Image: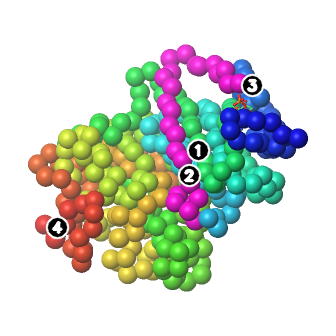
Amino acid sequence: MGCWRGNVRIPMSEFDLIRDYFHWQGAPDSVRIGVGDDAAILRLPPKRELVISVDTFNAGIHFPPETPPHAIGYKALAVNLSDLAAMGAEPAWFTLAISMPEANREWISEFARGMRELAQQHGIFLIGGDTTRGALSITVQVMGFVPTGGGLLRSAAQDGDLICVSGTLGDAAAGLAVVQQRLQMPVEAAEYCVRRLNYPTPRNVLAGVLGEYAHACMDISDGLLGDLGHILKASGLGARLDHACLPFSPALLQLPEEQRLGFALTGGDDYELLFTLPAEAFGQVQQAAGELGVKITAIGKMDKNQQGLLVNYAFSDKRRGYDHFSSN
Ligand code: ADP
Ligand code: MG
């Protein structure tokens, strides 16, 4: 049995897969119509604006093909939740478009489990999607809310703001190097870094406190320097970064300094938040974040008199995405 959808033949069993793995029970009141009809119908809360973001995840490009399906499901949603966190938005719903070479129930079951566990933690609900055959590719679109007129923008940094990050940097890039056998680490450190690669922690828990105090905010997906460059450009300011302040995990502290700085500055996949704060708010924000279980660290300062980004560290080679300066 089968039916035709566009020019892609989908056996009936794939409709069963949607029913079994993607049609979740327990929809919130905001979902009037979810999975199962031609489109979802959603109820918008008063005095809120809708925040939407989408990211595609291709096997072999955005994740190593051997990544466990549980981690793929988790991470495809995690990176999108991170975009909502970066906007200071409260998660509400998401859609999932998945293309896969075959309908392997074991694989899909693990994939859906990883995704659902994270969705439940964050109170975000799957409201629809699309299931097709093709090379493995996953597209998740998240939707959330900010109060009317709210939201944390890249363009809102101010002169003199402290530049801060959540968590630790460079772990995921080290994890990728381990998976790709470019880096050897002691077993425990290697496992930690691979876990940070496969299971990034989106920092949505900080959205409330950052919504109150932060000026600019974004998430770090492509390495600190390139991403901070976006804030500088959007805000029309320069900045100074002190490499000696960058927060590292015990695992990365085992690496030579230059190597861990390379992972933190130009590696990707951290999904930590990068934000700017008026200096006088730092203590309060640090304490509030600490109570939520997240370390935040000040790593530099926005400076209107600085041309571009001054990184207070002498690298042995010049890499794309930032200017090289020796110490000032
Ligand atoms: P349509 O013809 O409306 O595109 P589909 O057969 O693609 O219908 O999907 C049927 C229903 O299942 C729709 O409500 C759709 O949103 C939902 N759906 C399909 N694939 C997924 C998925 N991977 N995750 C969640 N919902 C899905
Ligand atoms: Mg469809």
Q: How is the image coloured?
A: rainbow
Q: Which residue is mark 1?
A: 139
Q: Locate the N terminus and report the quarter of the image it occupies.
A: top right
Identify residue type, mark 2. Phe
Q: Is mark 1 within 8 Å of ligand 1?
A: no
The location of residue 165, given as percent across then percent down, is 39, 54
Question: Circle 4 — which element?
Answer: loop
Residue drawn 68% across the image and 38% down it: 7
Residue 227 seen by the camera: yes
Question: Circle 1 — which element?
Answer: strand
Mark 2 or 4, which is nearer the eye? 2
**194 with respect to 86 (left or right):** right
Identify residue type, mark 4. Phe
Identify residue type, mark 3. Asp
Q: Residues within 10 Å of mark 2 (few under 14, many from 20)?
A: some
Per the model, the C-alpha gap separating discs 3 and 1 is 20 Å
Q: Which mark is residue 325?
A: 4
Between 115 and 105, the one nearer to me in the picture: 105
Residue 191 location, quadrant? bottom right
| Pointer 3 or 1: first along the chain | 3
Marks 2 and 3 close (CB-CB < 8 Å): no
Q: Is mark 3 within 8 Å of ligand 1?
A: yes
Q: Residues within 10 Å of mark 4 (few under 14, many from 20)?
A: some
Q: Which residue is mark 2?
A: 57
Identify residue type, mark 1. Thr
Mark 4 or 3, which is nearer the eye? 3
Q: Which residues are magenta?
A: 37-64
User: Residue 58: within the magenta?
Assistant: yes
Per the model, the C-alpha gap separating discs 4 and 3 is 57 Å
Q: Is residue 251 above or below residue 161?
A: below
Quadrant of ligand 1 in image:
top right
The location of residue 12, given as percent across then percent down, is 84, 40
